[in-house]
Amino acid sequence: MDHNEALEQSRARVIEAISQNMDLYGVTPSIGRLYCLLFFADKPLTLDEMKEQLGMSKASMSLGVRTLLDLNMVEKAWRKGVRKDLYVVNDDPYQRFFDYFSTKWRGAATMNTNAIETTIHELQVLTENPETPEEVRERAQVDIKNLENWLEYYDWLNRLIDSFESKEILEFIPIHKNKEQEE
Amino acid sequence: MDHNEALEQSRARVIEAISQNMDLYGVTPSIGRLYCLLFFADKPLTLDEMKEQLGMSKASMSLGVRTLLDLNMVEKAWRKGVRKDLYVVNDDPYQRFFDYFSTKWRGAATMNTNAIETTIHELQVLTENPETPEEVRERAQVDIKNLENWLEYYDWLNRLIDSFESKEILEFIPIHKNKEQEE
DNA sequence: TAATACGTTTAATACGAATTAAACGAAAAA
DNA sequence: TTTTTCGTTTAATTCGTATTAAACGTATTA
């Protein structure tokens, strides 16, 4: 085995691990490998180069790059004299983590909060309606109580995400270079 | 429309919203609806009751309940005289959030960390090998630097998850009842 | 025991998302 | 202009997973 192969083989291990676990970010292993390809590339890549290296279609590369752009995991790059679109990885793992929550989790929290608020309002109208049977009224009141508990949680979640976006979380959980760690 | 329907319809909105957004927890909308069914149930349910209410097969309920159990989103319940297995929702949203990170994200962090550490070690051996061509050595050194940056991130992530598990995060982002909020 | 009532597993199916080939439109080059 | 080179979109296909029917094993009951 020559040394170039050894390098590629070493890389392959982390590529596989990371690609598989990228489902936490809601992307497929294929897109995970695309991300890793860009991560290990020493220069911005074109769609054709990605297609070449991964042995997939150009359409897939186009789609894959776009979802990675949506997640702020890659960025467009520019190089004089190059007409093709170029892409580089956004290799700050903290930023990647924070961005993911800013987009996906924040979006879900907003949607759920809206649905819950609307529903609570409807249920309140229901309980205030004198024609509502007692049995239904009671169930509605239990629902309201439970849903208000969720609202409180989503408020908390939003504040957590705020601390990610503003990076204030790093005051509580600091990034400390682990210098004096085990050799 | 009778009042019972009104209640069901109000519930349906939040059920749909939450079920759709449950993909953040890595589960399908079907399992999301199963979770919501248990959430709104006023008593522990059997597999047959779930099957009945959702119009799905018993096998699906069995599978679905198990994945929810793995995520600590539901628990087994007991009732005297009832032979069938009973399940209730674990309706603490904070705990749900924390458990998810304890299992899924911690697991991914561990796997990736292991892969990265092994790879860094291999790359170091490669760079120390006098037969390694200079060009490969340089690329390996760049890789090592980048991967060490990731290791630092996963260490940070683990400490963040620690603060979830221990609930110390609540000292930084407190749960405050939003009493004095906009009416 | 035997018979029934469970829950789970397995193998087959059905459904949806990932992937691609081909068509398309836009921009640069000639 | 016309032609070529891009990237994207669309429609078709492929692939994987969700779902189910049926078989299975186990525990309870009689």
Image (spheres, coloured by chain):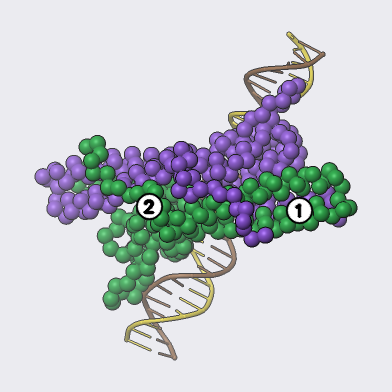
Chain colours: A purple, B green, C brown, D yellow
Dot 2 falls on a residue whose secondary structure is helix
Please name the residue that numbered disc 2 is placed on. B170
Q: What amino acid does circle 2 point to?
A: Leu
Q: Give coordinates of residue D15: x percent, y percent.
A: 65, 51
Disc 2 sits on a residue from what chain? Answer: B
Q: Residue at x 76, y 53 (%)?
A: B123
Residue farthest to the front? A180
Residue C15 lies, with reference to residue D24, above or below; the image says above
Q: Give coordinates of residue C27: x percent, y percent.
A: 67, 17
Callout 2 crowding tier (Cα within 10 Å): few <14, some 14–19, many ≥20 = some
| Same-chain check, marks 1 and 2 | yes
Q: Give coordinates of residue A116: x percent, y percent.
A: 31, 43
N-terminal of the pair, mark 1 or mark 2, is 1
Residue farthest to the left? A130
Q: Give coordinates of residue B137: x percent, y percent.
A: 81, 47
Relative horizontal placement of residue A121, taking residue B50 as reference (left or right): left
> Quadrant of residue A84 in the image?
top right
Quick check: can you spot residue B173? yes
Q: Which mark is residue B123?
A: 1
Real-space CA distance between mark 1 and mark 2, rounded to the nearest whole angstrom:
41 Å
Q: Nearer the viewer, residue A99 or B134?
A: B134
